[in-house]
Image (spheres, rainbow, N blue to C red):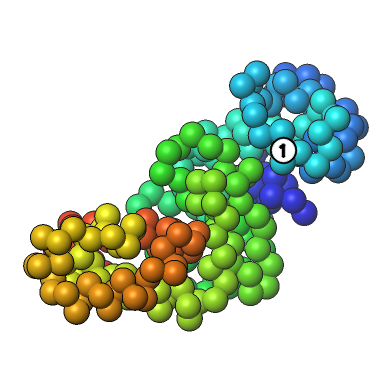
């Protein structure tokens, strides 16, 4: 099963009208021989992700690709899918448990967006067993090591609660005025921990998942 087939199974499309009669061809995205329609019916002339195509010489895309691309929430929301369900993730409060906790499903995929412009199925992968990769915009983030994921998140959350600004956590760089407020030891302890991590996909993803001021105020985390 590929990501497009998983997405199609999750959404459970009851009726799809194809612009062309599907025919057996090679899907340019998956390299698989299957029912396809012309690629031009799936993507616009501005499609530039040709580097990801497994069969770049093919001018066809599978009907599952068409179904995924035509589903509004595939690129206009964050989501979690299994072969049985599609869950639209609307807030960070909904997203965090999926990232921080073990997922019991044997087959799943997840995509988180902040731009609502990219095709999520092109940015993520299917997870099997103990694997836990999330698509996050253009990044593919390995969240398989739950101990490390939770340890990093708690250190970053503590820094936020201690008064270190989110932008300082993101960049591992802090203005003197902020250091003066939180204390030099608090900042240096965090800086020494984060200086070799802050450019990693996992660090950037967890920064995004940090709570808002409103969540902190309401003790929602």
Q: Is residue 154 visible?
A: no
Residue under numbered circle 1: 51
Q: Is residue 125 above or below residue 42?
A: below
Screen quadrant of the N terminus: bottom right
Q: Quadrant of residue 84?
A: bottom right
Q: Quadrant of residue 209?
A: bottom left
- Determine whether 19 is above or below 70 in the image: above
Q: Which residue is at a point 27% across and 55% down the rendered structure image?
A: 167
Q: State left or right for residue 88 relative to residue 169.
A: right
Local crowd size for mark 1, using a 10 Å CA cut-off: few (<14), some (14–19), many (≥20): few
Assign the C terminus to one quadrant of the image: bottom left
Number of callouts in the render? 1
Looking at the image, is 192 positioned above or below residue 68?
below
In screen coordinates, is 47 left or right of 209? right
> Residue drawn 76% across and 38% down?
53
- 109 w.r.t. 54: above or below: below
Front residue of 155/90: it is 155
Q: Nearer the viewer, residue 69 or 191?
A: 191
Residue, x 71% and y 21% (percent of image)?
41
Give the x, y percent position of residue 136.
50, 51
The location of residue 100, given as percent across then percent down, is 44, 71
Query: Looking at the rendering, which quadrant does residue 207 occupy?
Result: bottom left
Asked whether the viewer can see residue 171, the reply is yes
Determine whether the residue tagged by mark 1 lies in a helix, strand or loop: helix
Q: Residue at (61%, 21%) from the top-left corner?
A: 46
Q: Position of residue 159 (x, y in %)?
A: 25, 71
Q: Nearer the viewer, residue 2 or 164?
A: 164
Along the horizontal axis of the image, is 46 left or right of 136? Answer: right
């Amino acid at each position: 099963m590929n990501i497009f087939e998983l997405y199609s199974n999750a959404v459970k499309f009851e009726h799809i009208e194809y612009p062309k009669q599907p025919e057996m061809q090679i899907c340019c995205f998956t390299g698989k021989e299957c029912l396809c329609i012309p690629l031009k019916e799936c993507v616009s002339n501005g499609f530039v992700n040709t580097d990801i195509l497994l069969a770049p010489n093919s001018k066809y895309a599978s009907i599952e690709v068409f179904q995924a691309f035509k589903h509004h929430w595939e690129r206009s929301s964050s989501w979690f899918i299994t072969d049985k369900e599609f869950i639209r993730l609307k807030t960070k409060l909904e997203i965090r448990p999926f990232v921080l906790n073990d997922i019991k499903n044997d087959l799943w995929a997840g995509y988180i967006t902040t731009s609502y412009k990219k095709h999520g199925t092109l940015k993520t992968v299917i997870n099997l067993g103990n694997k836990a990769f999330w698509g996050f915009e253009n990044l593919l983030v390995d969240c398989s090591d739950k101990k490390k994921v939770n340890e990093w998140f708690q250190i970053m959350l503590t820094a936020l609660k201690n008064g270190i600004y989110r932008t300082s956590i993101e960049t591992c760089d802090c203005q003197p005025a902020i250091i003066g407020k939180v204390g030099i030891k608090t900042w240096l302890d965090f800086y020494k921990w984060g200086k070799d991590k802050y450019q990693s996909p996992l660090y950037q993803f967890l920064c995004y998942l940090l709570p808002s001021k409103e969540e902190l105020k309401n003790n929602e985390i």
